[in-house]
Every structure is written in structure tokens, then in C-alpha cells.
Amino acid sequence: MNVKTITSPSAMTRFVKKARAKGKTVGFVPTMGYLHDGHMALVRNAKRENDIVVMSIFVNPAQFGPKEDYAKYPRDFKKDSRLAKKEGVDVIFYPAVKSMYLPNHSTYVTVEKLTTNLCGRSRPGHFKGVATVVTKLFNIVPADTSYFGQKDAQQAFIISRMARDLNIPMKIKVVPTVREEDGLAMSSRNVYLDGNERREAAALFKSLSLAKKLISEGERNSKKIIRAIKDFTTKNSSAKIDYVSIIDTDELKDIKTLKGRILIAIAAYFGKTRLIDNMILEV
């Protein structure tokens, strides 16, 4: 059976409400397409826990800065449809930009505090675009549970807080990062890497693994761990580091001494491609 494609927001909402009225549970997987096994892990979780799985494919212009890669962001709807069908997605919501952002669109969602650190520092306005489109998608696809990947950890924290603060009646589930054999986190942007950059990109996860080892050996000084991550990454690749941070997982603030549940996060450029990765640990 072919996966059903719906392009109209109102038709998508009717479909979900009708399914839930019949007692069906609906799992929702929001994506920007160019699907890989990281997305499929979200689908598998949604499939296991729900009667119906809806996936959205929408490259959201509001979350790209003026010098970022919106126009060239990889897109392949035919391939995405095949992968979605193979994994058991029931419906793809595939709206046009003009149906998501009507003329004179002037309403945006801002999550304060959590958006100022990490990627929020180097990508101003990014999370306003993310929060806005996800709020719109949650209204259009009023599912029981929505699934996000830990690779985009800051995004997942922000969306969870937004859903809580705005009383959105949907459970947010965060699924562990899916990695390549060498540890590189799966990402649609990996396609931009040339052969050498792709090999070097494995240094991100290896540097995080080094940090985990240092912590297991008793190191609690965040500056020393951050320095070790930076030193390892620069010695083992040509990466230009954007940031390395160690933060708490509640307010996403930098911490000096490691304690409790922490997030170690890194962002770096390999050529023109910006990659992110992270690790959550209990200290």
C-alpha cells in the first residue's frame, strides 16, 4: 500500500482528528526531508507506540539565516516517499511554503533563555523559526506523541519546554542519536562533506568520547574538559570549531563544575558544512 500524501494543512488536521475520534493513536515525526536512518529510528519508535504514523516533510525557511543553506538544502521527495513507505509511515504531510506562511504572516513563537546559548549564539533567529514552525505543525497534526532526535539536543529541549509552557496536549519523545560506523551522527547535511571532510568529521564523536572518559576518571572541571575536546578535534581534523560547551539540561546554562545531568555539545565547520553533536551524561 502506498503512503498517503497530504499537502493541505486543513485536510491534514481533519485526517488526524478523524483517526483519533475512532480511538486510534497517532505518532508524529516532523522532518525537513532528505531522510536517513536517524529519521527512520524516529519512525520505528512512532510505529511501535502508535496505530498511525504521520511524517511531515517541510524545509522551513524561517529557521535559516540570510547566509545559510535554505536554497541548496538537500531535497529528494521521491526517495523520501520510498523510505517512508518501506518503514511503514501511513501519511506524509508535504505542504508548500505558501500554505504554511500565508501572505503578511506576522506571528512568531519565541522561547526565552533556552535559546541564547549554543546554536542560539551563532544562529540568531534560528530557534524562533523552529519554535514557530513546530507550533504550527503541532496545530496541524494534533497527534498523541511527537518524536525528535537527540542529535538536535537544544532543539529538543526547547520544543519540550515550549509544549509544556503553551499547554500543548502532546507528549514529546526524544530518541537517541543514530550514528555511522565511525561514530559520526547521521545528518542530512553530511551529504555536503567531501571524502576527506567526511573522514575527519568522525573527530566530533571521538572528542565527546574522550570527554566521557575523562569524566569517568574523575575530572569535574568543565574548562579542562572543553580544552581537551578542542585540542583533540583540532589535532585530528581541519575543523573550525564554532563552540564547545558543557551545560545543565534544565536551563541550558554553562556550568563550571560538573554535577548531575549534563549536556556536552560541540559545533564545528568542516569546509562550509556546519555539524553538531552532543552527549548527555549523569555525573
Image (cartoon, grey):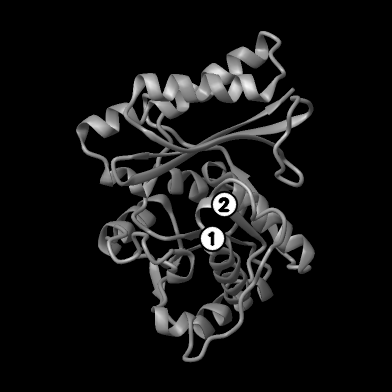
x then y, percent, for residue 163: 72, 62
Q: Which residue is mark 2?
A: 121
Q: CA distance from mark 1 to mark 2?
A: 6 Å
Q: Which residue is mark 1?
A: 124
94 sits left or right of 261 in the view:
left
Query: Could you say which is closer to the camera, residue 3 or residue 148?
Result: 148
Residue type, mark 1 in image: Pro
Q: Quadrant of the N terminus?
A: bottom left
Q: Residue at x 69, y 55 (%)?
A: 160
Q: Is residue 44 above or below residue 88?
A: above
Q: Are marks 1 and 2 in contact (CB under 8 Å)?
A: yes
x then y, percent, for residue 69: 34, 60
Let me know if residue 44 appears in the view.
Answer: yes
Q: Residue at x 61, y 58 (%)?
A: 146
Q: Which picture quadrant has residue 186?
A: top left
Q: Which picture quadrant has residue 110?
A: bottom right
In this view, which residue lies farthest toward the left? 195
Q: Residue at x 39, y 24 (%)?
A: 234
Q: Is residue 138 above or below residue 202?
A: below
x then y, percent, for residue 204: 44, 29
The label shown at residue 69 is none
Dot 1: within a 10 Å radius of its alpha carbon, few (fewer than 14), some, or many (20 or more) residues?
some
Residue type, mark 2 in image: Arg
